[in-house]
Image (tube, helix red, strand yellow):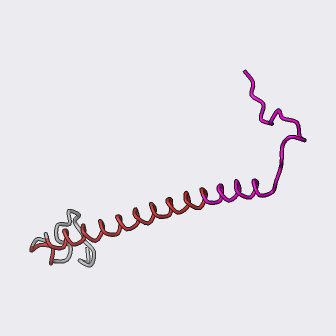
Amino acid sequence: MKFCSRSRKNPEEVSGSPVEDNSSTGEQESALLKTIGWISAGLGAVALGLFVGRELRLRYKFNHRTPYDFYAHAGDENDVEVGLGI
């Protein structure tokens, strides 16, 4: 079944007042602005969550240090022979 996108009424019967066109345009703009607002609010919430999560993780890691973390290269597995003259 094929649907016609145009109205089947006679053009004389249809009243094309500009007030109706402006109201539909205003509704479309309003919906677009609402969508953009919700998307920006969601992205802001994600950014805030990432920032807070990073800060909490850094504080957790800082508070759970071991005494060996105070020494340079503590826990390095590589044998570094730099500066030994070999």
Q: Is 83 above or below relative to 31? A: below
| Residue 1 as seen in the image, left or right of residue 44 | right
Q: Please tell me which residue is depicted at 34% across the width and 64% down the height of the picture.
A: 49
Position of the C terminus by quadrant: bottom left
Position of the N terminus by quadrant: top right
Q: What segment is highlighted magenta in the picture? A: 1-30
In front here: 65 or 63? 63
> Residue 26 appears at what percent x and percent y?
68, 59
In front here: 57 or 3? 3
Q: Please tell me which residue is depicted at 55% across the width and 60% down the height of the picture.
A: 34
> Residue 51 appears at what percent x and percent y?
35, 69
Q: Is 1 above or below relative to 4? A: above
> Residue 53 appears at what percent x and percent y?
29, 65
Magenta stretch holds residue 23: yes
In front here: 18 or 4? 18
Q: Please tell me which residue is depicted at 59% across the width and 56% down the height of the picture.
A: 31
Q: Which residue lies furthest to the front in this view?
A: 13
| Residue 37 as seen in the image, left or right of residue 18 | left
- Quadrant of residue 72 in the image? bottom left
> Residue 36 appears at what percent x and percent y?
56, 60
In front here: 86 or 37? 37
Q: Please tell me which residue is depicted at 52% across the width and 63% down the height of the picture.
A: 37
| Residue 50 as seen in the image, left or right of residue 58 | right
| Residue 26 as seen in the image, left or right of residue 80 | right
Magenta stretch holds residue 19: yes
Q: Which residue lies furthest to the left in this view?
A: 67
